[in-house]
């Protein structure tokens, strides 16, 4: 009669311990890859926002509307002082993103209007902040719009 051979209990436990150690060592690398991917997406969005600021302001200058103060609309993009406004209908339309499935907007307009843009339906510690032109009557310097990526989405300075 032929005797069947199999793995002993000790061999199976040793293999499970080794696989567990490999999983523990690989998990942080996979988490970092996810964060790197989220950051890369936001860096691409930042480049699109910066490009949209230049493109829209160039169109405004070519249309001869750069001296208009206040809100206006050019090519379906809401503008404020010749730049994309701090809203989904402003910078969102200029870049081609909307508040919904892929992105979410969270804005404030205290002294210097800012809007946070982050990936929707994801827990991410990164977001993009688009800072528009200061509101009329604000004591802030009249600087052109800018964008930056921040690590803590709750940390928006509105001073």
Image (tube, helix red, strand yellow):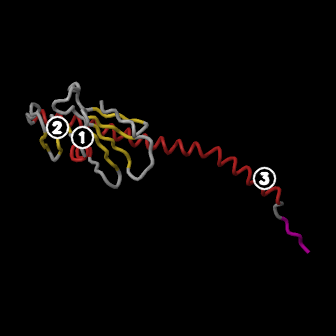
Q: Residue at x 33, y 43 (%)?
A: 117
| Rendered location of residue 37, percent (x, y) | 46, 43
Please give left or right for residue 124 compared with residue 27 in the image: left
| Rendered location of residue 96, percent (x, y) | 26, 47
Picture quadrant where residue 47 is located: top left
Cα–Cα gap, marks 2 and 3: 66 Å
| Rendered location of residue 5, percent (x, y) | 85, 65
Q: Residue at x 15, y 35 (%)?
A: 82
SS at circle 3: helix
Picture quadrant where residue 9 is located: bottom right
Q: Could you tell which of marks 1 and 2 lies nearer the N-terminus?
A: 2
Residue contact between numbered discs 2 and 3, judged by CB atoms under 8 Å: no
Q: Nearer the viewer, mark 1 or mark 3?
A: 1
| Rendered location of residue 159, percent (x, y) | 30, 29
Disc 2: CA contacts within 10 A as few (<14), some (14-19) or many (>=20): many
Q: Which residues are magenta?
A: 1-5
In the displayed orientation, state which residue is furthest to the right: 1
Write down the residue under mark 1: 86
Write down the residue under mark 2: 80
Cα–Cα gap, marks 1 and 2: 8 Å
Residue contact between numbered discs 1 and 2, judged by CB atoms under 8 Å: yes
Please give left or right for residue 20 compared with residue 105 in the image: right
Write down the residue under mark 3: 14
Q: Nearer the viewer, residue 19 or 92?
A: 92
């Amino acid at each position: 009669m032929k005797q069947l051979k199999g793995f002993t209990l000790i061999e199976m436990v040793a293999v499970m311990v080794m696989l567990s150690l490999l999983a523990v060592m690989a998990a942080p690398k996979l988490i970092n890859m996810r964060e790197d991917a989220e950051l890369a997406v936001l860096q691409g969005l930042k480049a699109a926002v910066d490009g949209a600021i230049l493109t829209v302001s160039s169109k405004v200058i070519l249309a001869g509307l750069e001296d208009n103060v206040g809100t206006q609309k050019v090519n379906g993009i809401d503008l404020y002082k010749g730049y994309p406004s701090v809203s989904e209908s402003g910078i969102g339309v200029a870049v081609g993103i909307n508040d919904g499935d892929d992105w979410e907007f969270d804005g404030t307009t205290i002294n210097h209007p800012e809007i946070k843009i982050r990936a929707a339906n994801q827990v991410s510690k990164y977001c993009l902040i688009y800072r528009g032109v200061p509101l009329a009557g604000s004591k802030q310097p009249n600087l052109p719009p800018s964008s930056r990526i921040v690590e803590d989405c709750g940390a928006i300075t509105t001073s």
